[in-house]
Amino acid sequence: MVDLSTVFTGLRFENPFLLASAPPTESEHNILRAYEAGWGGVVTKTIGLHPVVNVAGPKTKFIRADNSGTRVSMLKRPDTTLMASWNWELISDKPMDWWLPRIASIKRTWPDRILVASIMAGSGSDKELANWQTLVGGVQDAGADAIELNFSCPHMDRVDMGANVGKDPVLCSVSTQAVKAVAKVPVWVKLTPATANIVEEAEATFRGGADAIVSSNTFPSIPPFDPDTLDPEVNVDGYVSSGGMGGPAILPLSLAKMAQMTQAFPDREFSGIGGISTFEHALSYFLLGCGTVQVATAAMLDHAIGPNVIRNLTEGLAAFLKRNADRGWTSLEDFRGLRRDRIVAQSAIRRPDAAGYHGGYEEDAEGYAAPDLAKV
Ligand SMILES: Cc1cc2nc3c(=O)[nH]c(=O)nc-3n(C[C@H](O)[C@H](O)[C@H](O)COP(=O)(O)O)c2cc1C
C-alpha cells in the first residue's frame, strides 16, 4: 500500500503538492477549484496592508525558444517550446478585509486541506514590524493553517520589502522574530534566490524562529528587446522594470539554491519551488530533502489551477512508490533526502585516470567544435 500523505511543519497534507502563491491562488473560486482538483495545499497570493496598483499593461508573459533555431522571444509563434514565465505583478491588490472572510469560508468548505496565508509587510521600522503582526493575527484568526512570509518578491522598490528583506540577514531575522512573537501556527519563510550565498539568509531566518524555508521565488530578469521596435518585449510607454522569471528554465537554478540549504541544515524543513510541472521535477527536490513542493507557472498554463498537473504529480508519486516497493518504500519519508549527499565540491569529483590524461596535450580538437564543422 502506498501513502501519498505527509507531515510538514507538524501539519498533515493529503499529498505533498501545493499551489504556490501566484495568480492560481488569488481568488476564493480558484482555491476551491484547486482543492477539488486534488492539490494537497494552497498558498494564497501574498496579502499586504499597503495599497497595490499594478502597471498599466500585461503583468505576465511567457518566454518561448524556437525549436529549430536560436530565437528567444515572448512573441506567440508556432514551433516553439515554452522556457519560462516572466512577470512584474505585485502582491494581491485585494486588501486584508477582502481576504479574511474568504480564508474563513474556504476553511469551512475544506477543513482538512491545508491553507497557507502568504503575507508581506515592510521591515524598516517598528510600525512596519507591527504590520507583520497585524497580518499574522488576521489570517490565523480567520483559520489559516500556516503563514508564509514573502521575503522574495523581486520587483519591490522599497528597500525594506520583498526580496530586499531576503537579501539582508538582519532584516530576515528581525522580521521572522516579530512574526514568531505572535504566531500560533507554523511560520514558513520564502527567501529570494538573488543572493550570493542563500545559506547566510537561511541561517538568519532559522535563528529568527522560522519553521520552514521555501525557495525559490522568481529570479530577477528583464524581457528581451524587440529587434524591430527596439522596445523591451513587455513595456508600458516603452519602459520596463526588473521582473521575475519562473517556469522550466529555473528548475536547475532553484535546485542549486535548495541543495545549498538542505546540506547546510539537514534537520530543517524545506518546501521546493521552481520549474515543477511533472513528478520527475518534484522528485529532484524530494531527493535533496524537501518535504513539500509548490507549483506556479505550470498551473497557470493548465486551466488556471493545474488539474492535469496535480494529476501527474499524484499519479507519478504513487507509481514511483509502487516501482520501489521492493525497497520497502511506502511514502515520501522513505526516500526524502536520499541524494542530498551527491552534490559535492568540484575537487571531489573523479578525474580521468593517468592513462586518459595528458596534461592538456590531448589529441582531441581544440575547444568544443570539431575541426571540419568549424570551417562551415
Ligand atoms: C504571475 C506571478 C505572480 C506571482 N506572485 C507571487 C506572490 O504574490 N507571492 C509570492 O510569494 N510569489 C509569487 N510568485 C512566485 C511563485 O509563487 C513561484 O515562486 C515562482 O513562480 C517559481 O515557481 P514556478 O517555476 O512554478 O513558476 C508569482 C509568480 C508568478 C508567475
Image (spheres, rainbow, N blue to C red):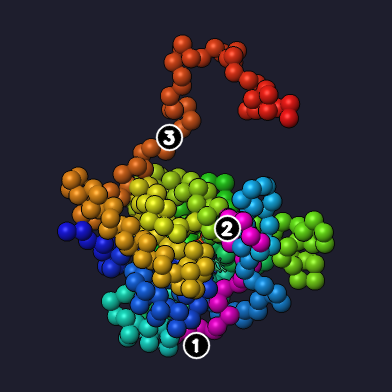
| Residues tagged 2 and 1 counted as in contact (Cβ below 8 A) | no
The image quarter in which residue 208 lies: bottom left
Q: Give residue 20's position: percent from left, percent from top.
A: 46, 67
User: Would you say residue 147 is visible in this rendering?
Assistant: no
Tag of residue 133:
none
Tag of residue 97:
1
User: Which span of residues is magenta-colored?
Assistant: 77-100
Task: Verify whether residue 78 appears in magenta.
Answer: yes
Q: Give residue 215's position: percent from left, percent from top.
A: 47, 57
Q: Tell me: 12 left or right of 118.
A: left
Q: CA distance from mark 1 to mark 3?
A: 48 Å
Secondary structure at numbered mark 3: loop
- Ligand 1 closer than 8 Å to label 3 CB: no
Above or below for 220 versus 364:
below
User: Would you say residue 93 is visible in this rendering?
Assistant: yes
Q: Give residue 278's position: percent from left, percent from top.
A: 41, 57
Q: Nearer the viewer, mark 1 or mark 3?
A: 3
Among numbered discs 1 and 3, the one appearing first in the sequence: 1
Secondary structure at numbered mark 1: helix
Residue drawn at x 46%, y 49% as measured from the top left: 255
Write down the residue under mark 2: 82
Residue drawn at x 57%, y 73% as measured from the top left: 91
Q: Amino acid at mark 3?
A: Val
Q: CA distance from mark 2 to mark 3?
A: 31 Å
Secondary structure at numbered mark 2: strand
Residue drawn at x 55%, y 83% as measured from the top left: 94
Q: CA distance from mark 2 to mark 1?
A: 37 Å
Q: Amino acid at mark 2?
A: Leu
Q: Amino acid at mark 1?
A: Asp
Which quarter of the image is occupied by the C terminus? Answer: top right
Which quarter of the image is occupied by the N terminus? Answer: bottom left
